[in-house]
Amino acid sequence: MSDEMVKIVGEVLVRHAEDDALEPCSTRDVLKGKVVGVYFSAHWCPPCRAFTPVLVTFYKKMKEKGQEFEIIFVSSDSNQEAFTEYYKSMPWLAVPFDDLRKKKLHGQFGTQGIPHFALMEPDGTLITNSARGFVNNDPNGVEFPWRNKEAPSTPGGGLRGYLPVLYFFVFCYVFWSSRGSSASKDASDGS
């Protein structure tokens, strides 16, 4: 693993300890030679809570196949308790809840919303910033880590797909509102 990965995610991450506590671990030691997924998520987010079990299943399959792969959770939770409770459902590493790197990582990966899942090479080079779509479309990881693949569309990935419908409803609202006001004006003039 290069120093570049340490520059990206920091020197220390946390993982689950035997007693349900969180223990610090060296980024260099736990990520050496591995493809790294960075998972932005939060306890309060329904799409996140739906995707997390899918990602857990995927992660376990990759581990069973012997893939050199690790995930780092970057929480968008508002308090330590929510982070701790949600993180219990995840078998991977995490950026400590109170770590200021979380904001930097959001900017670095250009997260527009959550859940967001990106994949990096062991040297920190980005493989894909759309790994969530790949996990959904290739749940067995047949083509993992999806190098040189076109990113699939992701359901719930923003309003982009709904904009024509939104424009239509706004147009109808404006059209019918203006007709209603002119009709009521005509009615008041005729009385």
Image: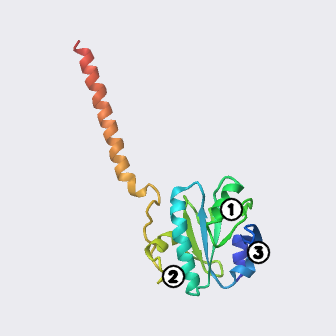
Residue 172 x/y as whole percent: 31, 40
Q: Nearer the viewer, residue 50 or 162?
A: 50
In the image, 179: left or right of 112? left
Residue 44 x/y as whole percent: 58, 54
Regarding residue 10, the answer to whether it shows in the image is: no
Q: Which residue is mark 1?
A: 102
| N-terminal label among 1 and 2 | 1
Which residue is the extreme one toward the bottom?
66
- Whole-Å distance between the Cαs marked 1 and 3? 17 Å
Quick check: marks 1 and 2 in contact, CB under 8 Å? no
- Identify the amino acid type marked 1: Lys
Quick check: marks 2 and 3 in contact, CB under 8 Å? no
| N-terminal label among 1 and 3 | 3
Residue at screen point 73% across, 60% down: 100
- Whole-Å distance between the Cαs marked 2 and 3? 26 Å
- Whole-Å distance between the Cαs marked 1 and 2? 26 Å
Q: Which residue is mark 2?
A: 144
Residue at screen point 53% across, 74% down: 57
> Compared with residue 1, is residue 186 higher up or lower down, i.e. above or below?
above
Dot 2: element: loop
Dot 1: element: helix
Dot 3: element: strand
| Numbered mark located on residue 25 in the image | 3
Tag count in the figure? 3
